[in-house]
Amino acid sequence: MNAETSAPPLAPPPAPPIPAVSTVGLTRTYGTMTALNALDLTVNRGDLFGFIGSNGAGKTTTLRILATFLAPSAGQARVLGHDVVRDADAVRHVIGYMPDFFGVYKDMEVTEYLDFFGACYKIPTAQREKTVNDVLELVGLSEKKGALIGALSRGMQQRLGLARVLIHDPQLLLLDEPASGLDPRARIEMMAILQELQRLGKTIIISSHILSELQTLCNRVAIIEKGKLIYSGPVQGVRDQMASGLVIWVKVAAETDRAIELLKSRSEVAEVAPVDGRIKVTMVNHDIDHSCIADTIVRGGLKLVGLAEDELGLEEVFLRVTRGETQ
Amino acid sequence: MPFLPIVERELRVGARRPFTYWSRLAAAAFALLILVAMYALAEVSKGAIFTAGQAQFAVLKWLSFIFACSAGVFLTADTVSEEKREGTLGLLFLTDLRGHDVVLGKLISSSVTAFYGFLAVFPTLALTMMFGGVTVGEFWRMVLIISNTLFVSISAGLLVSSMSRDAVKAINGALLVIVLLLGGLPLADFILAAGDIMKFHPVLSLASPAYLFWSAGPLLPRDYWLCVGLQHALGWMMLIFCSVCVPRTWQQRTSRTGVHRWNWLRGGSGASGSGRRLLDKNPVLWLAVQDRWLRWLVWVLVLAAVGQFSWAVIETARSSQTPMPMGPARVAVGSPSTASTRTVTTTNGTTTVMFTTSTSTRIATSRFAVSTISWLLALGFKIWVALQACRFFIEAIRSGTLELILVSPVGPAEIVKGQARALLRIFLVPALLLLLMQVTVGIQGILEMRHSLGGVRSMPIGSFDIVFMQVVSLTAGIMNSITVLLALGWFGMWMGVTTRKVPVAVLKTVGFVIVLPVLGLTFASGMFFAMMMAASTFGRFPFWVAPLLYCGLNSAKDLAFIFWSRNQLFTRFREMAAQEARAVTLSPWPPVVAAKEAAIAQ
Ligand SMILES: Nc1ncnc2c1ncn2[C@@H]1O[C@H](COP(=O)(O)OP(=O)(O)OP(=O)(O)O)[C@@H](O)[C@H]1O
Ligand SMILES: [Mg+2]
């Protein structure tokens, strides 16, 4: 901001940055089935972008279109300014795509495999060996250089897949469920690698249906369901937008009914209901200061035994959102 | 019944495949077409070439027999091995299922597919009785023989499949077993009889479907039933052996040490110099020549054939001044039923007889062996080209590698060119060797012909230059041999992109490029002759026109296949690869089955 204001007056205003990915009305049908329905998505450069949806939501379809493997039935998609249909070749040079089900020839050696894809990306021979070593180093597979791919564990194969994606140093990574089938430790390692890559300036789109892992990892997320975009924005925003108001659980020593009466009179409170001897208080929105609740009860001369903010996790939001969509 | 779940699953999967549906329909239509075509031919020629009933029966029974024999290769050879590759076989054995449950399930499901085909053909076969010349007994004997052959062939395919994991090896293994069963057993008997046809006494041959098929007519009822029984027992024996094998061979076999035991056979590593060069030239080319198994097989067999051929040449030259074997090498590369061969045999039939009578039995035998082996090799070579052309894409799509390559800057054109060049690398030199054999024999034949005609260059009948005709048919034959291999390669590649199963892709390739056109052309040239005979323009027509026309049409067909497949590959590759990338059937075929499927699923 400061840089902008202190810039010399004659310099032209900086062009708005090209987003890493932008789609307009992106649609894909399989026969009569609409897998992707008019998706409008924008991913900024440098984002670590979570792409969330339940099984069959259309995540893989979207990523395949962005990777130029599938052609959209309608709509447009641009990757770093290049159209995925008209400019497919330019797109291919700047993306790295890792499919969910990922292809290996089991009787190929790790270095052979990477060497092969290095050649596919036209990396000069002299440079290739070094690149292969570098990416193997980065994903922590250096000791497995000469091993057959079939003899690698699932987690190692996954990391090899990541190494392959990185071989041509793409600016945008499209990773389809890279953490599936990994144990918690391997998952954390994978996340650490991804964060490192983000720090190196890469834009990463990672699809998943496991929200908790994206919650801490990603700075922005999109949720799709049945091919439609439901939410796109910062992680914190999901809750605010998706969940109804904040829920507070209140427990008083006695006179629950009076407590309910008292709480109902507050304007910040949307709804009050007794549940199992406790009182569920739903506030009108999410950011509200809920100190007024304790205040009201204590002023009313009642004994406050417990007060807790409901920890509505992303999981629950996700469940709500998807349930709402299917019904 | 414990194997029923598998049968049910197999039948359901089968019902969902368009192939199952089409094969049935096609078989019936095809048989009927042949019946009608041959009737037309007999009518036009007014019985001069053949009479309807018997000839129709003969052609249909031959086709059914060939189909029954190849069922083991194309229907069952890659069933169990495919489940091994996919890892689904192991899942079956984690349940209560035993080896024989799986084998019987596979047997029933695959024989049902084949049997439907036969059920569609048998009524047509029975129709031939209406045209006369075929007895009811003859008909039923043949039905039994063909069904039994189908059973034996399917069992052999299953047996090979239970012992392999790789599609290419399974298909080749089944080919080998079936060839041994058909030809190997009678050949062994022949060798036991010291190569003298008069002393031939069938012992091992009794177990060979080919022997039974061949001699069904003259065979005594006792011998007939003995043969049928023996072969049936052989089929069951193979199945039992297969049940024993299956549970023992399904485990993964990747070496845990991570080092190849057969590195030299597999191909060079990417790090080596030549590998690097290939990778830089075209990465797909490098990938496609990785598995060298088939390459070795082709080389070994072609070299064996060349060796045997040279031996035969030397042997013939040494034993007398008798001429070289004429027939064998002409068929070595060109298809066995080209008009050049046929018309030539009709015209030089007398010379051929003269040659055989003047040679010893040993040479006759060796000549027979050379011709059979080179015929088989020619057929095998074509199947291998088709196999190698389609298998690379099928595997690359299935493993997801093609998807990864397609999102890299390597485009469809480069991928297709890479595979085409890989095919050239694998087959070019062996194909040239085979062509050389063909040319050698052809030229030798022409020289011999000139020699034996003793300067008389034109035959009394009609007035045409027989030597000139030989030259024409040799040239045309060579051209055919070249174009058909190219067509197999290109069309095979396209089948590889559009088909999901290796044997089906090979079957389609060979069927469309060779079998159907040959049948069609044979019929057409039959018609041509019949009409010429009817119009009695026979002698006035320059004789070399016929082979030239036949081969020209043949090559035109090949060129059409080449251009069409190339066009498809270069324009629709990405679309097809993307659709097939996922093993989701878009819409089951025909729709009736789709509705039923949906009902079952609910
Ligand atoms: N090749 C195909 N043919 C037919 N339908 C398809 C094909 N590929 C995907 N679909 C359908 O498109 C829809 C979206 O599929 P997609 O693979 O994009 O889902 P996803 O979000 O990746 O699901 P998952 O979490 O299970 O990976 C699904 O309903 C699927 O059945
Ligand atoms: Mg998916």
Image (tube, coloured by chain):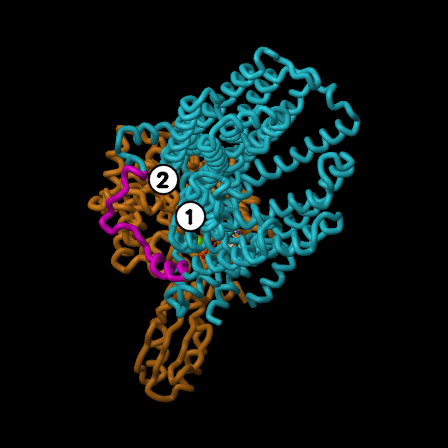
Q: How many labels does the image show?
A: 2
Q: Is residue B258 magenta?
A: yes
Q: In this view, does A259 lie above or below B69?
A: below
Question: B64 or A213: which is nearer to us?
Answer: B64
What percent of the width, then of the height, locates residue A139?
26, 46
Q: Is residue B51 above or below residue B442?
A: below
What percent of the width, then of the height, locates residue B321?
46, 20
What percent of the width, then of the height, locates residue B3?
47, 67
Residue at image point 32% right, 31% down: A123
Mark 2 belongs to chain: B
Tell me the SS state at disc 2: helix
Residue at image point 53% right, 24% down: B478
Q: Name the residue under label 1.
A: B170
Label 1 vs label 2: CA separation? 12 Å
Q: Mark 2 points at which residue?
A: B293
What is the number of the mark on residue B105?
none
Q: Can residue B458 be seen in this view?
A: yes
Q: Is residue B69 above or below residue B539?
A: below
Q: What residue type is labelled 1?
A: Ala
Colour of chain B as rendered: cyan
Question: B194 or A195: which is nearer to us?
Answer: B194
For the magenta stretch, what is the residue range? B241-266
Q: What residue type is labelled 2?
A: Trp
Q: Quick one: label 2, few (<14), some, or many (20+) residues within 10 Å?
A: some
Which chain is assigned orange?
A
Q: Does the magenta stretch include residue A220?
A: no
Give the left or right position of residue B557, taking residue B152 as reference: right
Split into 4 quadrants, where in the image is the C terminus of chain B? bottom right
